[in-house]
Amino acid sequence: MRVNQKHTIILFLFFLANTTLFAQDEKISGNIVLQMGANDTMHVVTATLTNIATKQPVKAVQLTFYVQRTFGLMKVADGTTDTTGITSAEFPLTIPPGDPSGKITVVAKVENSDVVNDTSFSTLATSKIPYQQSKKIAASIAGSNAPLWLIIAFTLTVGTVWLFFAYVLYLVYLIKKSAVKSIHN
Amino acid sequence: MTTQNKDNNRRNFLKSSATAIATGLVGGSIINSFVSCKDKNKTEGEKMNVLTHDGKLVAIDKSQMANFKPHISDEDVRKGIPGKKFVMVIDLAKCDGCGKCTKACNKMHYLPTNKAWLSVVDMQDSSETAPYYFPKPCMHCDNPPCTKVCPVGATFKREDGIVAIDNTRCVGCRFCMAACPYSVRLFNWLEPEKPNIVETTPAAEHVFQSKKGCVEKCDFCPHMAREGKLPACVTGCPMNAIWFGDANEDAVTCYDGTTTKLSQLLQDGAAYRFMEELGTEPSVYYLPPTNRSYDAKEIKIENAE
Amino acid sequence: MEKIDQEIKNKIQDELLATVGKRYRQETFWVIFLSIICIGGTVAWIFQLKKGLGVTAMRDYVSWGLYISLLFFFVGISLIGALVSCVLRLSGAKWRYPLIRIAEAVTLSAIFFAGFMPVLDMGRPERLYYLITHGRIQSPILWDVMAIATYFFGSVIYFYLPLIPDLATMRDKLTDAPKWRRTLWKWLAMNWTDSLIQRKLLKKGMFILCIVILPVAISVHTISAWLIAFTLRPGWNSTIMGPYFVFGALMAGAAIMILIIAKLRIGYRLEKYLTAVHFNHLGKILLALTAFYLYLNINKYGVPAYKMAKDEKPVLEDLFFGNNSILFWFTQIVGIVIPIIILSIKKLRNTIRWVVTSSILVLLGALINRYLIVVPSMLHPFVPIRHAQPGFATYYPTLTEWTITASSLAGFLLLTILLFKPFPVITIWEVTEELEKQGEKPIGVENILTTQNSAYHAS
């Protein structure tokens, strides 16, 4: 987590260097720190928005909270920072995780704000729903492997018929055999 | 773990492709991908267009082909992408029948204009009811009638919900076409025109699936899903009518990137599945064509017969 | 039991052995004619293999056409072997003796082509062996392959068993035949000395096979019916398909049997053995089967027609009033109702000509009916056809397709003729044995047949 945060800060410093040169002067660069918690039914996410330069909290900025999904970010909540730069929001614990660790990635974003440049921060939270292992789709005949009853039924039916064929061929062999005897006699 | 492995593979792959590009670019330019492959001579130093698994065309020297090892095995393809269960939601109220999904799909899969994996059907249930446009991809049924009858396992149901076709296995008996109640399967009656690309993935996840004497159909673009990208039809639909996602994550995404809760979307939109009464359990959901964003009267139903 | 006069026995043997190796002008003509059609078909097939199945009129909607219809037809007539060798045997009909080998020959060649039709229809026939290496036994195709293979093998044995004593006769009598033939006969005759033990063993083998082959034969046709009944298509999604196919098959089989014995009777000069009595009996069987088939047809088309459900409606309307209505009403009226009327009239049933005429009608109806089972359902899928490319929403078979179809039928006839050629077409030993049982009677099977209406001999 901490490493992550440092990385983000460094990244944003880079960004700062670039954006301050060309962007409008009135926008500041912000930094979001997320803290995850939970009550019985809801994830509680608390975000703190600070000015990177002054380390002062930024108030009255709209934050949007997303959960990372395979093909995009799913919006789950939003909130506006108070005077301490903090906002918190709740979203259901029942959002399923996207990877085997059972974690969900929560992303907070500042988008199209008049005060702060677009910025985002992500963190992990534990989902209450276990990760869905690839489960077998119950379709015995549609599947790749034949169900046992079918194998048994198929083999038995075909086997029985061919056994009778083999027996008849054995009878033909006996016909040949019996003639040899009678000739010898 | 799996993601790490994948990353490693990708890194190795990028390394190898970087060398390949370097050697390849010395000799010449990128060959037009639609040049017919009939006139190619198998000579040394020939350039080949390799379609990498992340959807890039790379021109390389033919001798470098060995560097392009598939990053997924045949078993991976038969099993599917772990932990996923792909679903599609099509909002009939938004579909104005422009057919851009079909075009995007055809472009992605190198299909000629007379083929459509995803066709938009004008529907009218009776003369009194309102007509509507009905995009019809493969339903990727959970109880697929097609995979049941395949004699060689050339079409199969993957654990991620995709019904795929392996055209190196298909014998061309067309039983699956007879069995499919949605008529989504197409057959290559003649030799298809091949794009000048080489694919390194196993056949069932090829972008170009046409092969003479084999069956092909919509495959939900698994090669894109492996990269976390949406299928061609979704990114080709400017009306945001097609949503695609993972049911295990309970989320679907559409053209503009909006991601929404699948269960909520199905509930609020009173979703249904096409011909539910057949028990095929499709993976494609439809939102009924209520409050349409286009004029329904303009739809002209053309009967084929 | 009186011993039959050796002289009479010899005479029968000589008469029946006369066809072996002998050339008939008409037969030679047919063999050449059919061979030419087959060569044409082979050329067409090579063309189809090279170009792809696009040379046929089959497209994405009608993805099965003439070839699969013909598969069902061939599987159908292959049932005749089971009818004659099992059903008639178990019912104790003595008049069947001269028919056994003919029926088995027809069965063998029909089942061979039934196995061949799917190969013609395959997009990639070079991958045929995948059925073994990658076979999925959940698929009815695998069952069909297995059933056809089993029935073919069973029919070969059933063809061979009654042949053993006749091969011995040939070995003993036809001493002036080429040496390789005599060696082959000697080897195939299995040291047959006509001893009591050998007869007992042979009868036992035939009895076992007769019991075993019946379910196999029925399964072959039922599974072929399942190929279409296992799908959800309107018109196919029906539980009647199995019995419908089996009885349609028996009907077609009886019809082709009548036609073939009518031809052989004149061509091979077997009037003494294939008599009006056979045509009368087979005519009665054909009447019963045709009447029952009419009943099945009423069920198959009448029941959904009463309901006119949304999905079934387009198929039924196509058959009743649409493009296929002429063919449909032809099969129903000319192929079923008229033969029933002809065969119901005793006077007509007793004349060979009328029995043969009604057989031709039945067979023609059965052939067209296979087409009507397959194609209209494919033309009316659940999802309505819209914006179809030209040629996709219709089915008019191409010349290539007709050529291959015709040559498959020609090949079937050719193989049947060639199977008649190396052996006597009528089982000599069974005919003479029957004479022995009847006691010494003037020559000619006619007389035997008239006296054996009641007696049942366990064989």
Image (cartoon, rainbow, N blue to C red):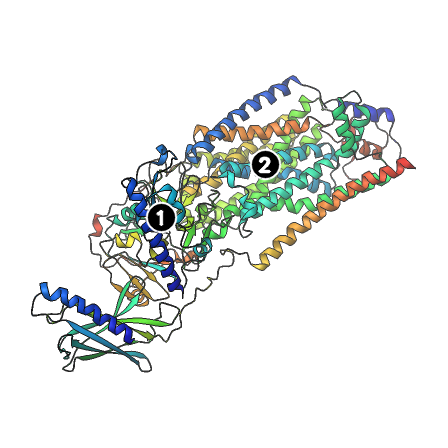
Is residue C148 placed above or below C33 in the rendered structure?
below
Query: Which residue lies at the image location 35% right of the left edge and 60% below the top edge?
Result: B87
Side of C438 relative to C29 (left or right): right
- Residue C174 is marked as none
Which residue reaches farthest left?
A25
Tag 1 residue: B207
Q: Nearer the viewer, residue A50 or C303?
A: A50
Tag 2 residue: C252
Type of amino acid at the residue the image marks with label 2: Ala
Q: State which quadrant residue A29 falls in.
A: bottom left
Side of B166 relative to A55 (left or right): right
Is residue C196 placed above or below B240 in the rendered structure?
above
Type of amino acid at the residue the image marks with label 1: Val
Residue C308 can be seen, yes or no:
no
Q: Secondary structure at mark 1?
A: loop
Is residue C242 placed above or below C27 in the rendered structure?
below
Query: Which residue lies at the image location 52% right of the left edge and 33% below the top edge?
Result: C334
Q: Chain of mark 2?
A: C
- Coordinates of residue C8 in the picture (x, y in percent): 84, 25
Dot 1, crowdedness within 10 Å: few (<14), some or many (≥20)? many
Q: Nearer the viewer, residue C315 or C19?
A: C19
2 vs 1, front mark: 1
CA gap, disc 2 to disc 1?
Answer: 48 Å
Q: State which quadrant residue B45 falls in.
A: top left
Q: State which quadrant residue C171 falls in.
A: top right
Discs 2 and 1 lie in a common subunit: no
